[in-house]
Structure formats: structure tokens, C-alpha cells
Amino acid sequence: MLRAARDRGEIAERHDPHTVAAFLVAFLNGLLVSSKITPDRSFEPLIDVALTALD
């Protein structure tokens, strides 16, 4: 899916799909842990930053 997104220009060509997948899994795991520690915190700004890393 990430390879197809890169081919369509939705993800910058310089990004390796396997590396992006590993980053997204690690980021999601971090968000899950953080949400357990601070459940009423908004993580939307962090998600925005993570998504801009794919540009």
C-alpha cells in the first residue's frame, strides 16, 4: 500500500516503503503507550507532525 502511495506521489519518492511502515508502527505503539499514561491528552498535533514527515 505504501509503495503504491509513493508511486502515486502521495508519499515522497525519497522514502522507502519498508522504513515508512516501520516508522508508522513505532509511532502508533508510542501513541498507544502515551494514551495509557495521559488518556485525556490530544495527540492530533503529533499525528500532524508525523504525517508531514511523509511529504
Image (cartoon, helix red, strand yellow):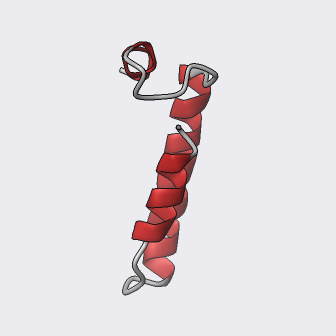
Q: Vertically, is 22 above or below 34?
A: above
Q: Is residue 1 left or right of residue 22?
A: left
* Residue at 42% from the left image edge and 12% from the top image edge: 7
Callout count: 0
36 vs 44, nearest the viewer: 44
Task: State which quadrant residue 12 falls in.
Answer: top right
Q: Vertically, is 9 above or below 51?
A: above
Q: Vertically, is 33 above or below 10?
A: below
Q: Is residue 32 left or right of residue 12?
A: left
Q: Residue 40's spot in the image, x, y percent?
A: 37, 87
Quarter that holds the N terminus: top left
Q: Vertically, is 16 above or below 25?
A: above
Q: Residue 50's spot in the image, x, y percent?
A: 53, 52
Task: State which quadrant residue 36 falls in.
Answer: bottom left
* Residue at 46% from the left image edge and 69% from the top image edge: 45
Q: Residue 37's spot in the image, x, y percent?
A: 50, 81
* Residue at 43% from the left image edge and 74% from the top image edge: 35
* Residue at 40% from the left image edge and 68% from the top image edge: 44
Q: Residue 10's spot in the image, x, y percent?
A: 40, 28
